[in-house]
């Protein structure tokens, strides 16, 4: 079966760095998305990785290892507004997105 | 620029009542359209997707249905709601043919079935 695993909840301190991990098992693989979702709102796009390695976008970076079925989202210089859920989604061989349950990130001052 | 809107934002319905959620996209033509449901503590569940007018693919057999009467309009319906239909419903669009393209989501509709 297809499966996406990510931690349910994480807590971090304002100004610090946090890494949110995601492991995936899919029938075929055509890339991995990270989305941010504030409570009660729609998800918004953060990143897409299809090749191994690290992609950096300002305070956010996303890493992918296809051989390990593993990705992480790295958030630096955390701000209170980063408190949200972070959704990992892998694209399978049919180009459908398989979504994880999301990681709720709590930022403390 | 492209925009996506869905409504209503919130609704409370009794069991057995009908449902209609509507979604429209502006600023693009012939988009792929999607309806997702998000239950607490679970990942987004794809309910329906459409690659064109009148073309609907169902991912999960249930008492919901979808229709695409116009190119940029996508409607989610039910004739008789169940308690288990409660959740956060999200409409989304993606550029036709962009199989790994970004999904753009509507604001969401929170449905509570009592």
Image: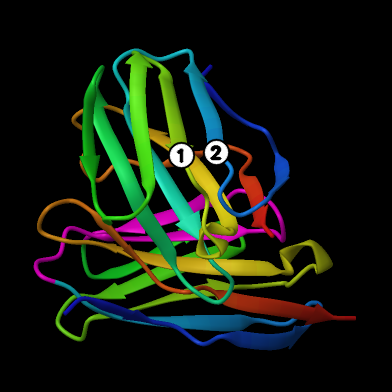
Q: In the depicted view, which residue is nearer to us: A104 or B108?
A: B108
Q: Label 2's element?
A: loop
Distance in Å between CA atoms under marks 2 and 1? 4 Å
Q: In this image, B18 relative to B63: left or right?
A: right
Give the residue pinned by disc 1: B79
How is the model colour-coded? rainbow
Give the residue pinned by disc 2: B18
Q: In the depicted view, which residue is nearer to us: B49 or A46?
A: B49
Where does residue B58 sit, x and y in percent of width and height?
Answer: 24, 45
Q: Residue at x 21, y 40 (%)?
A: B57
- Magenta segment includes B97: no
Question: As displayed, is residue A27 above or below residue B113?
Answer: below
- Callout 1 crowding tier (Cα within 10 Å): few <14, some 14–19, many ≥20: few
Chain of the residue under the numbered disc 2 shown in the image? B
Find out whether the residues at labels 2 and 1 contact each other: C-beta distance under 8 Å. Answer: yes
Where does residue B36 sit, x and y in percent of width and height?
Answer: 43, 50
Q: Label 1's element?
A: loop
Question: As displayed, is residue A44 above or below residue A23?
Answer: above
The span shown in magenta is A27-50
């Amino acid at each position: 079966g297809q499966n996406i695993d990510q931690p349910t909840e994480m807590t971090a301190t304002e100004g610090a760095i946090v890494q949110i991990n995601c492991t995936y098992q899919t029938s075929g693989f055509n890339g991995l998305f990270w989305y941010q979702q504030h409570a009660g709102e729609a998800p918004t796009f953060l990143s897409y990785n299809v090749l191994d390695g690290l992609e950096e976008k300002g305070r956010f970076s996303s890493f992918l290892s296809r051989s390990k079925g593993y990705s992480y989202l790295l958030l630096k210089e955390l701000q209170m507004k980063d408190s949200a859920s972070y959704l990992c989604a892998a694209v399978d061989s049919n180009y459908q997105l398989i979504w994880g349950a999301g990681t709720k990130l709590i930022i403390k001052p | 620029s492209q925009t996506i809107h869905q409504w209503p934002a919130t609704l409370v319905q009794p069991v057995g009542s009908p449902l209609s959620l509507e979604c429209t996209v502006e600023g693009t033509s012939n988009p792929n359209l999607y309806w997702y449901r998000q239950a607490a503590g679970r990942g987004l569940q794809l309910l329906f997707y459409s690659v064109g007018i009148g073309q609907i693919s169902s991912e999960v057999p249930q008492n919901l249905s979808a229709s695409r009467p116009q190119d940029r309009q996508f409607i989610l319906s039910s004739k008789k709601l169940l308690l288990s239909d409660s959740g956060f419903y999200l409409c989304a669009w993606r550029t036709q043919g962009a199989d790994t393209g970004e999904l753009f989501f509507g604001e969401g509709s929170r449905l509570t079935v009592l």
